[in-house]
Amino acid sequence: MLDQIPYLPYILSAFIGIGLAAASGFRVFLPMFAVSLASYFQWIPMSESFDWLSSLPALITTGIAMIAEILAYYIPFVDHFLDTISIPMATVAGSILFASQFTELGTFPQWALALIAGGGTAATISSGFAGIRAASTATTGGLGNSVVGTTETAGAGIMSILAMAAPFIAAIFAIITLILVIVFGRKAWRKLKKRKQINATH
């Protein structure tokens, strides 16, 4: 019966892509490593144009980068430096992972859709958590940053697994995450801005 649903492969690809893009918003390299690992062991199919992701060098590189990124977010000041570059990096990673699910489309629609949907999702989540971390630093002196960092890592792991194992659930979680991050991220940036204004007047 599922085979009779029009455009089902594209719908599933969109769900997987959104899930992986959302995971990239939490952590850049964890979802890249998850996809590389899954495709290396042939747990998931990988098209020829993205076959490099399933190679052993890609698996090792993304694995090392993932560990370094996770650990770096527990180091004071380094986490804020990473926040300055995480948004463009997340945009690129989200776009690549989203595009990997739409190889049957033409090059232009594939990457246009990937940049808008995949890159946009990843960038929104990444910028939202950057604001939350900045607000955490301002209000807790950085003591709460480890909680934010752990939440991001857990979110990236859960979303990566769900995107490949349960795409529909991953898409729902991605949408919920986007809404929450937009709401709380904006509040965090506003609090930080107001705090800076108060400090500037004293």
Image (spheres, helix red, strand yellow):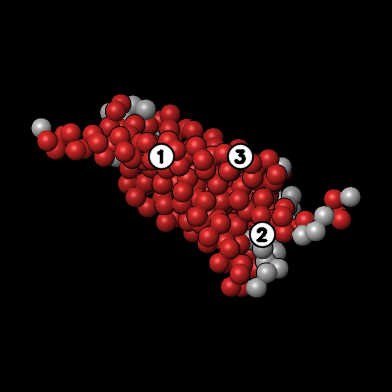
Label 3 sits on residue: 173
Q: Quadrant of residue 186?
A: top left
Contact, mark 3 vs mark 1 (Cβ under 8 Å): no
- Where is residue 122? Give x, y as percent: 50, 50
Q: Residue at x 23, y 34 (%)?
A: 195
Disc 3 to disc 2, how far (Cα)?
A: 19 Å
Q: How many marks?
A: 3
Disc 3 to disc 1, how far (Cα)?
A: 17 Å
Disc 1 to disc 2, how far (Cα)?
A: 29 Å
User: Front-most of 66 and 24?
Assistant: 24
Label 1 sits on residue: 185
User: Front-most of 117 and 28?
Assistant: 117
Q: Quadrant of residue 7?
A: bottom right
**Mark 3 or mark 1, which has the lower sequence index?**
3
Q: Residue at x 28, y 37 (%)?
A: 192
Contact, mark 1 vs mark 2 (Cβ under 8 Å): no
Against 87, is 195 above or below?
A: above
- SS of the residue under disc 3: helix
Residue 142 marker: none
Label 2 sits on residue: 101
Neighbor class of circle 3 (other Cα within 10 Å; few <14, some 14-19, many 20+) is some
Mark 3 vs mark 2, foreground winner is 3
Against 101, is 67 above or below?
A: above
**Mark 3 or mark 2, which has the lower sequence index?**
2
Judged left or right of residue 101, residue 148 is: left
Neighbor class of circle 2 (other Cα within 10 Å; few <14, some 14-19, many 20+) is many
Q: Quadrant of the C terminus?
A: top left
Q: In this orientation, does residue 57 appear?
A: no
Residue type indicated by callout 3: Phe
